[in-house]
Amino acid sequence: MAVQYCEKCSKDTEHKEIMKQKPSKYGKSKKEQFKAFLEGFFSGTASPVLASLDLLDRYVECQTCHHRKLENHGDEFQ
């Protein structure tokens, strides 16, 4: 765990990193889910590591107050 400044606590506290799946930009219908599958399949064949990172958001959570902050840094999280 890393020590970072927490905006809610107004002091340096320990934080942990959490990776959560991004919400799908596709709908819930079978056709839309098939489009999502095809996009994931073809992007995964080009670069399996970067394809999986495109589907994740990186959060840091304060261990004192449990405040979460989105921290997507770098091109892989864009």
Image (cartoon, rainbow, N blue to C red):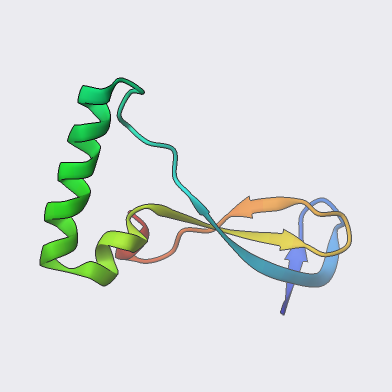
Of 71 and 28, the residue lying toward us: 28
**Image quadrant in which the C terminus is located:** bottom left
Q: In percent of the image, x 43 and y 64: which residue is there?
A: 73
Give x and y (percent) for residue 61: 71, 60
Extreme residue in the top direction:
29
Q: In percent of the image, x 44 and y 38: which residue is there?
A: 23
Q: In percent of the image, x 33 and y 23: which residue is there?
A: 27
Give x and y (percent) for residue 44: 19, 61
- In this rendering, position of residue 45 left or right of residue 67: left
- In this rendering, position of residue 42 left or right of residue 50: left
Picture quadrant of residue 19: bottom right
Extreme residue in the front direction:
30
Of 20 and 41, the residue lying toward us: 41
Picture quadrant of residue 62: bottom right
**Image quadrant in which the N terminus is located:** bottom right
Of 30 and 14, the residue lying toward us: 30
Give x and y (percent) for residue 54: 32, 55
Q: In percent of the image, x 86 and y 65: which residue is there?
A: 11
Give x and y (percent) for residue 28: 36, 23
- In this rendering, position of residue 10 left or right of residue 69: right
Q: Is residue 3 above or below residue 59?
A: below
